[in-house]
């Protein structure tokens, strides 16, 4: 029995849901998203509530029950509130600038790194801080992870790109010792 799958999704005001065949369209103030529904999942949409249930008890339906409920919930939350990830850029001379739908990073390499943002993603760049915003939770996380991978935080001096509040364990480094 899926605890996540059995909880009911409440629709905020201004969010409309429409089901056609195996696609659920979610429209809200921030935009619209679609969710591809699994074959073994059944939806009941009634006055501001969505109830996700499974048609039968085979293993695929059981495994997708909670997943589909959470994907639908993420779409509803995304079109009403949106999602964001905050990144910090640490290091001498490391920074980021926004140029329309492109980000330009200076990360200690001999060249600047340019990253084109996908549709539906906005970035708010302030020198050493970056906020990635959008309505699709998976896409926001994917773009943030790609940006972090440009220069991962290194454990000796802590330089690099990290999520805000991320703890990076630092190593001691080499020490000069007498070879006696």
Image (cartoon, rainbow, N blue to C red):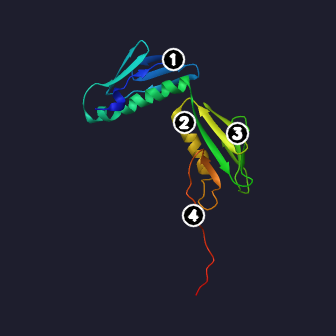
Front-most of residues 153 and 174? 174
> Is label 3 in a helix, a strand or a loop?
strand
Q: How many marks?
A: 4
Question: Is 92 left or right of 176, judged from the image as shown?
Answer: right
User: Circle 1 is placed at which residue position?
Assistant: 15
Residue at image coords 31%, 28%: 40
User: Circle 4 is placed at which residue position?
Assistant: 171
CA–CA distance in space, label 4 to label 3: 30 Å
CA–CA distance in space, label 2 to label 3: 18 Å
Q: Quadrant of residue 70?
A: top left
> Is label 1 in a helix, a strand or a loop?
loop
Q: 27 above or below 91?
A: above
User: Circle 2 is placed at which residue position?
Assistant: 139
Task: Decide if residue 118 is in sight here.
Answer: no
Whichever of callouts 2 and 4 sits on the residue coming sooner in the sequence is 2
User: Circle 3 is placed at which residue position?
Assistant: 125
Q: Quadrant of residue 144?
A: top right
Answer whether labels 2 and 3 touch (C-beta < 8 Å).
no
């Amino acid at each position: 029995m899926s605890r996540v799958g059995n909880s009911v999704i409440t629709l905020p005001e201004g969010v409309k849901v429409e089901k056609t065949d195996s696609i659920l369209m979610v429209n809200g103030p921030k935009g619209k998203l679609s969710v591809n529904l699994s074959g073994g999942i059944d939806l009941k949409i009634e006055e501001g509530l969505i109830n996700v249930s499974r048609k039968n008890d085979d293993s695929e339906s059981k495994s997708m029950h909670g997943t589909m409920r959470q994907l639908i919930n993420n779409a509803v939350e995304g079109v009403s509130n949106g999602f964001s990830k905050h990144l910090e850029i640490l290091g001498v001379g490391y920074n980021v600038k926004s140029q329309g739908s492109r980000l330009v990073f200076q990360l200690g390499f001999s060249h600047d790194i340019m990253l084109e943002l996908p549709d539906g993603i906005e970035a708010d760049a302030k020198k050493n801080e970056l906020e990635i915003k959008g309505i699709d939770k998976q896409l926001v996380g994917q773009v943030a992870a790609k940006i972090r991978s440009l220069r991962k935080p290194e454990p000796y001096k802590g330089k690099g790109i990290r999520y805000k509040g991320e703890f990076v364990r630092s190593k001691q480094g080499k020490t000069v010792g007498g070879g006696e």
